[in-house]
Amino acid sequence: MSDRVVIVGASVGGVRTAQDLRRLGYDGDITVVGEESEQPYDKPPLSKQLLLGKQSEADISLLGEGGWDAIATEARLGVRATSLDIDSMVVNLADGEELEYDALVIATGVRPRTLSPELTELDSVFTVRELRDSRALAARAHLGPVVVVGAGFIGAEIASSFRSLGTEVTMTEALSTPFARALGPEVGGLLTDLHETNGVNLATEAAVTAIEKSGDLTLVRLVDGRVLEAATVVLGIGAVPNCEWLEGSGLKIEDGVFVDAGCAVLANGVGPHAEGVYAIGDVARQVDPSTNKDYRVEHWTNAVEQAHVVARQIVDPVAVPEPLKAPYFWSDQFGTKIQMVGRPAEATSVSLHHFETAGAERTVALYKNAGRLAAAVTLGWPRAIAACRKAWESGSSVADLPAVLADLADRARSAAI
Ligand SMILES: Cc1cc2nc3c(=O)[nH]c(=O)nc-3n(C[C@H](O)[C@H](O)[C@H](O)COP(=O)(O)OP(=O)(O)OC[C@H]3O[C@@H](n4cnc5c(N)ncnc54)[C@H](O)[C@@H]3O)c2cc1C
């Protein structure tokens, strides 16, 4: 067993790895390195509960009572890891410290894309990844119109939160249907309805050509010549993995750090693996052994599940990794829980199914490929997603799923009588 575990990234995946190591009985040293100086906090509430004032900063702490001491972990916060030497098994920090490891967990996540570097100079233009972003945005709800650039999940959550606070919101999207990039036009249409019903202005086929200040206003120029006036602009145009610090380390990196099914890092030219090095969460690009395809998944549950896989391997190096689970994601918009399992991009067709549960209509989108379930999205029906997840993981025929969901709906109706 390793005596010294170093974890780089003090957030969702990194902190969970330290907690799981202690839960599994690991009694060696653990050091967590984090670039942010904040104590670790959860990320999903930044665009919703925290912005809406439904949760406080204390509520979203990732450490339990007793903080770092409770998991006997040393934290180096406010300092970046700058390079890795896999031969001498050392991580170098920006302050000159060198940390030796027997096991290293890379959990450095992603950072938001921006349209141009100059935009970071504008005090009215934001991205959302850190606590300070959410804090700053919460203070701007009363300042006037918000323009959200990009109708992806984070953009849509920001639009939903500001609208719920009574702020005028316009969301722009380069494609003709918002949300279509991730979910296709069918589910994109449903989410468009949800946003329009709740008063979000949608500007589609509206690539942004420029963002500039004009007095107190920020002007968002669209490709069709329109100009949107905003007090605040939020960019939700995707993210890039934080793996530059690993350049030159010999690890296999291409839009993420390549890992095997057990999250062990694959090395270039120095053998199949870098000894004792793992990567998890948003930064990891995992190879699915059953298809040999690789995926980088920016979902909270993925980071937490991979943290567990790695902690188990560090404690028990001969443990066989569990089979990969269905990718799972949720989002909360206008009081509706949107949940997804699987990979919509791999579907060849999509069908929408409507069910009557206890007094409410529920919609499930089934994405299919060769008779199998490629993905499923449910709107406001958490119980259905478990059935879809089971079908995805078992690889069973998708043909049976509508009947399974109809049965769930029947039972929900009977229980309500
Ligand atoms: C606003 C927002 C809302 C979200 N909502 C949802 C949701 O509703 N549902 C869902 O499934 N997922 C959601 N996610 C995604 C989810 O939070 C991520 O998938 C999860 O946080 C990934 O965990 P991670 O440990 O890989 O990365 P992170 O939690 O991002 O942690 C990475 C950490 O590494 C640090 N770091 C980076 N580089 C270095 C370095 N060189 N040295 C030291 N530290 C470094 C970063 O500062 C960061 O703190 C949301 C994300 C955001 C930002």
Image (cartoon, helix red, strand yellow):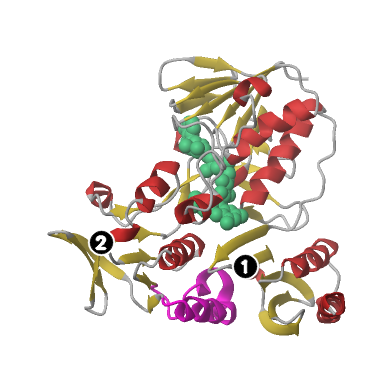
In this view, the residue in front, 176 or 90, is 176
Q: Residue at x 27, y 64 (%)?
A: 144
Quarter of the figure with the C terminus: bottom right
Residue 81 place in picture, x, y as percent: 47, 27
189 within the magenta span: yes
Which circle marks residue 338 in the picture? 1
In this view, the residue in front, 147 or 96, is 147
Disc 2: which residue: 231
Whether residue 247 can be seen here: no
Whether tag 1 and tag 2 are in contact, CB under 8 A, the answer is no
Q: Residue furthest front?
A: 417
> Quick check: 39 left or right of 13?
left
Image quarter of residue 262: top right
* Amino acid type indicated by mark 2: Ala
Q: Secondary structure at mark 2?
A: loop
Q: Nearer the viewer, mark 1 or mark 2?
A: 2
> Quick check: 83 left or right of 267?
left
In primary-sequence order, the first of circles 1 and 2 is: 2
Q: Residues within 10 Å of mark 1 (few under 14, many from 20)?
A: some
Q: Secondary structure at mark 1?
A: strand
Q: Residue at x 44, y 25 (%)?
A: 79
317 within the magenta span: no
Overall secondary structure of the magenta stretch?
helix
Magenta residues span 173-199
Quarter of the figure with the N terminus: top right
